[in-house]
Image (cartoon, helix red, strand yellow):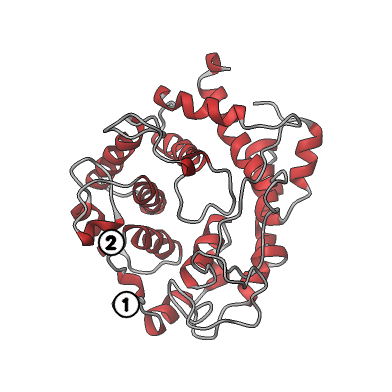
Amino acid sequence: MEISTQNLDWLLSTDPALRWQVQRDLVGADEEIWAQTRASVALEGFGAKLLSLQDEDGQWAGGAYFPSRQDPRVAGRRDDEEGQPYTATTWVLNTLREWSLDAARLSGTAEKLSANSTWEYDGSAYWGGEVDCCINAYTLANGVWLDADVKALEGWFLEHQLEDGGWNCDWVEGSTRSSFHSTLNSLRGILWYERATGGNAELKAARHRAQEYLLKRQLLYTASTGEHVGPWVSDLAYPFRWRYTALRALDYFREASLFDGVAPDPRMTEAVTRLKLARDDEGRWVQSQRYPGETWFDVDVPAGEPSPWLTFYATRVLKWWNESLPNTH
């Protein structure tokens, strides 16, 4: 997909956490250039700010998944909005990992979390995970990134995959039907783990089964009624957090397809078409909302404004799709 010089310049004027990805994936810059920008994520802008907020015990906001206190340094939406807070350890690690911060900048964090952090649900050890699929997926990915021992979670996902191919965080309440949200979060964690370790045949097969769960539904529809799975599937909001959206699913399938060395699955065509139609007249994608919940600070624009992050992700997905399936323009 072609991107205008104006929009490319706009994306290149952003924080290093986004700019290095634009340089690599949209500009096609030499590795020396984008690697230098990626290294600066730890030194300036959003990444450096999040690093500066880490507690001495290795945590953020004193908690694993939820903050244990309201920190006076929190600047983002401290009102009574509905929604969980996003200032605790797991959410910050997710963000820094997804921005590809050099794990060496968090040297010693894995050991500190082993010693000091436990899950709010049942008090279990941080790197052992708990009962929630999404939390365990984050822990699997963050653990392998920080060189913590999370191998037990590899087996956990194999044991808790449901009959229809996906996962559901409500399995502990007796649910036997997979969730779009839980399945995508699990897939993303597993793929990160596979890329870091090579995985194994059993884990790869489980991932492919879960991918099929979403592909059968064209990333958009329920299997039982064929109806649109929910209004949230078309949301355009960054940060993505835990929610399923078609854009976030397409971004996952781009990464999985490149990792597996396969072409995009044509069953994603309608989701891709909808993404194209969401582009505004200037070739940008607009932030439809910001998910409620306390944040350390905002990293993207308010609702109603063109979002550099969403424009990058959407443009990258369409570039991959068009280059892999050139007759689908």
169 on left or right of 274? left
Task: Give me the residue at 34% from left, 62% from top.
Answer: 136
Kindly state the secondary structure of the residue where label 1 is placed.
Answer: loop
Residue 245 in sight from this viewpoint: no
Task: Give me the residue at 70% from left, 54% from top.
Answer: 302
316 on left or right of 173? right
**Residue 229 position by quadrant:** top left
Task: Give me the residue at 30% from left, 38% from top.
Answer: 208
Give above or below for 317 relative to 307: above
Q: Residue furthest top?
A: 327
Looking at the rendered image, the quarter that the N terminus falls into is: top right
Labels 2 & 1 near each other (Cβ < 8 A): no
**First in sequence: mark 2 or mark 1?**
1
> Amino acid under label 2?
Leu
**Residue 16 position by quadrant:** bottom right
> Amino acid under label 1?
Ala
Give above or below for 114 relative to 229: below
The numbered mark at residue 153 is 2
Residue 215 point in image, percent of width and height: 35, 31
Q: Which of 155/306 is in front?
A: 306
Residue 21 point in image, percent of width and height: 64, 46
Mark 1 burial class by Cα count in 10 Å: few <14, some 14-19, many 20+:
some
**CA separation, marks 2 and 1?**
13 Å
Residue 125 point in image, percent of width and height: 32, 77
Kindly state the secondary structure of the residue where label 2 is placed.
Answer: helix
Task: Give me the residue at 58% from left, 43% from top.
Answer: 236
Can you identify the residue that label 1 sits on?
125
Residue 138 point in image, percent of width and height: 41, 60
Residue 120 in sight from this viewpoint: yes
The numbered mark at residue 296 is none
Mark 2 burial class by Cα count in 10 Å: few <14, some 14-19, many 20+:
many
Looking at the rendered image, the quarter that the C terminus falls into is: top right
